[in-house]
Image: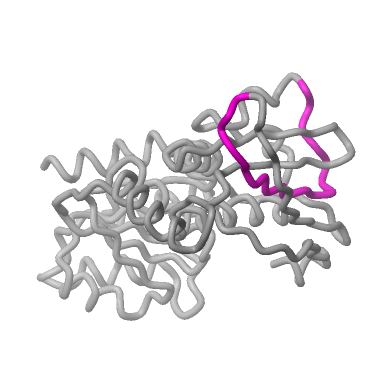
Amino acid sequence: MAYKRHISMKTNNVDYFLIADYQRLKQVLLNLINNAIKYNKPNGFVETTCDLISNVADGSGDWVRINITDSGKGIAEENLYKVFEPFERVGAEITEIEGSGLGLSIVKKLVDAMGGKVGVASELGKGTTFWLELPLADNPANQIQQHEFISGKINAPSQKVGNLLYIEDNSSNIDLMVQVLEEYRPSVNLITNMYGKNTVQFAKDYSPFLILLDLNLPDIHGYEIVKLLKADMKTKDIPVVIVSADAMEKQVKRLMDEGVQGYLTKPVDIEQLLDIIDKNLNV
């Protein structure tokens, strides 16, 4: 994505061991870096740096601060306080980027769960820096022990109650769906596929309680997939909800006439999405 938008990636190469959950830290960093690229300007830059911070005053020991700085349009000072609130997309309404405000609220929850801190500094017209701080580990062994403890704290086991099939060719949208379900509906088992032609077979194999379907897939249009699903005795009764940026009235009517249950437009309203999931789970 950075290459396509001619955005240069910069970093300072340092080696620190952190007290953190590897998978969750990776998820946080990918989310912040992806945002820095998406909301940047063409030919801009994203710089990731790490600094050692000594908190001698409060006795909490050494911490590492990770900064992700972009050269985008920035965020107005009066909007900074709400960037980590769910369903906020500050400034994003005037861009052409698909997205949802859920990502940053999940970032904050994950960092909080790892015992860290997260924040933002920005100046309108000059770019934004998101930062997170995590405790410095004394050695790799300590890091591993803490990793196991915190991972268990975040990933409380939950019994899966049903399969949700998501047909979508955009990896960012898939990542968002993973984050939404992990955070808000961890009992739902997500199955994804980037191609449409084998949707009917996936539906037969996994018996999902709901199919979320994008329209503009690389191999077949979603409208044709709906017709195939409705024509097969084993899949015709599985609820299908369209998730697409194409909200033309004629398009929506055509699909509703084919028997789809609902139509979500991108960027997805997360509360509406969760409501649809809950209603189909409780049938």
Q: Is residue 50 above or below residue 122?
A: below
Residue 40 seen: yes
Render colour scheme: one colour
Q: Nearer the viewer, residue 165 or 116?
A: 116
Quadrant the C terminus occupies: top left
Residue 43 appears left or right of 69: right
Residue 246 appears left or right of 159: right
Q: How many marks?
A: 0
Quadrant hosting residue 134: top right
Q: Nearer the viewer, residue 96 or 153?
A: 153
Q: Is residue 232 above or below residue 256?
A: below
Residue in the image at 79% along x and 34% along y: 122
Q: Which span is picked out in magenta?
A: 58-77
Quadrant hosting residue 14: bottom right
Residue 33 appears left or right of 202: right
Q: Nearer the viewer, residue 261 or 194?
A: 194
Residue in the image at 67% along x and 45% along y: 65
Q: Is residue 56 above or below residue 188?
A: above
Spot occupied by residue 261 in the image (x, y as percentages of width and height): 27, 48
Residue most extreme to the top: 78
Residue in the image at 75% along x and 54% along y: 49
Residue 76 is covered by the magenta coloring: yes
Residue 191 appears left or right of 265: left
Q: Nearer the viewer, residue 139 or 39?
A: 139
Spot occupied by residue 148 in the image (x, y as percentages of width and height): 34, 56
Quadrant the N terminus occupies: bottom right
Spot occupied by residue 19 in the image (x, y as percentages of width and height): 49, 50
Spot occupied by residue 109 in the image (x, y as percentages of width and height): 45, 37
Residue in the image at 66% along x and 25% along y: 57
Residue 260 is covered by the magenta coloring: no
Residue 246 seen: no
